Image: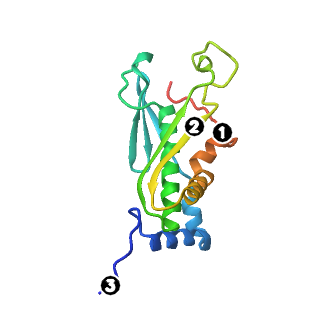
C-alpha cells in the first residue's frame, strides 16, 4: 500500500519542492514557467471588455457613475486583485515550505489615483495611476509573529505581479489599424 502524501494548506509539500527544484535544475521547466504569458482583451461595447488568458476569460467594466453598467470589476480593481492573489500564492507557498499551517489568510489592497484628470483628458501632467498601493496581510497560522513576518516579506519580495508593478517596467506598444 502506498504511503499517503502529506498535505499542508491544501498543497503537497513534497510535490511543491519537486516542482520548485525542477525550475532550478531543468532549463526546459524554467523556460516553460518563465513565459511568455499572454492575455488578449476584446472590447465588448461601452466600457466593457473581456480578457482571455489560457482557457480562462474575465469580464471587465467600469462603475455606473461612468455611464457604464458596473457588470464586472474594472481593470484597475483587477490589478489590485492580481497583486493580492499573487501575494496570497506567495504567502501560502512560503508558509507551506516552512511547515506552517495556515488557518485564515486575507490580503486587503487599496489605492487612490494620483491624477485621474489625465485619463479624463483634462490634464497633460501627472500620473493617472496609483502612486501608492497599500497591501495588508491578515493571517491566523501556527507560527510566531517573526516567522509570519518573514513569510510575508518573502511573499512580497518574490511576487512577480507586485514586483512588476513596483519597479519600472518597459512597456512596448504597437498599433495596427485593421479593416477599412
Gap between marks 1 and 2 measured at Cα:
24 Å
Q: In this view, does 75 lie above or below 57?
A: above
Q: Is residue 112 left or right of residue 70?
A: right
Question: What residue is shown with label 3?
Answer: 2
Q: Is residue 21 left or right of residue 14?
A: right
Q: Earlier in the sequence, mark 3 or mark 1?
A: 3
Quarter occupied by residue 4: bottom left
- State the colouring used for the structure image: rainbow
Task: Indicate the secondary structure of the residue bearing disc 2.
Answer: strand
Say which of marks 2 and 3 sits in front: 2
Q: Earlier in the sequence, mark 2 or mark 3?
A: 3
Question: What residue is shown with label 2?
Answer: 134
Q: Which residue is drawn at 61% across and 74% down?
A: 25
Point out the residue furthest to the left here. Answer: 1
Point out the residue furthest to the front here. Answer: 144
Quarter occupied by residue 3: bottom left
Q: Which residue is drawn at 59% across and 36% down?
A: 133
Q: In this view, does 43 lie above or below 165?
A: above
Task: Indicate the secondary structure of the residue bearing disc 1.
Answer: loop
Towards the viewer: 117 or 103:
103
Question: What residue is shown with label 1?
Answer: 171
The picture places residue 69, in percent across and down from the top left corner, at 36, 22
Point out the residue furthest to the bottom here. Answer: 1
Crowd rating for badge 2 (residues with CA inside 10 Å; few <14, some 14–19, many 20+): few
Gap between marks 2 and 3 measured at Cα:
46 Å
- The N terminus: image quadrant: bottom left
The picture places residue 55, in percent across and down from the top left corner, at 39, 50
Amino acid at each position: 500500500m502506498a504511503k499517503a502524501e502529506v498535505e499542508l494548506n491544501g498543497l503537497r509539500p513534497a510535490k511543491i519542492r519537486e516542482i520548485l527544484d525542477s525550475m532550478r535544475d531543468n532549463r526546459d521547466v524554467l523556460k516553460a514557467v518563465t513565459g511568455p504569458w499572454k492575455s488578449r482583451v476584446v472590447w465588448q461595447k461601452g466600457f466593457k471588455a473581456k480578457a482571455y488568458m489560457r482557457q480562462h476569460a474575465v469580464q471587465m467594466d467600469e462603475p455606473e457613475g461612468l455611464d457604464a453598467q458596473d457588470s464586472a470589476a474594472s481593470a484597475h480593481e483587477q490589478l489590485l486583485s492580481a497583486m493580492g492573489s499573487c501575494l496570497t500564492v506567495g504567502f501560502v507557498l512560503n508558509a507551506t515550505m516552512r511547515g506552517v499551517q495556515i488557518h485564515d489568510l486575507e490580503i486587503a489592497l487599496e489605492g487612490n489615483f494620483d491624477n485621474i484628470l489625465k485619463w479624463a483628458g483634462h490634464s497633460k501632467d501627472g500620473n493617472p495611476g496609483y502612486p501608492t498601493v497599500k497591501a495588508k496581510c491578515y493571517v491566523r497560522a501556527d507560527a510566531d509573529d517573526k516567522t509570519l513576518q518573514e513569510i510575508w516579506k518573502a511573499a512580497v519580495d518574490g511576487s512577480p505581479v507586485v514586483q512588476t508593478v513596483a519597479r519600472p517596467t518597459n512597456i512596448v506598444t504597437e498599433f495596427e489599424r485593421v479593416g477599412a
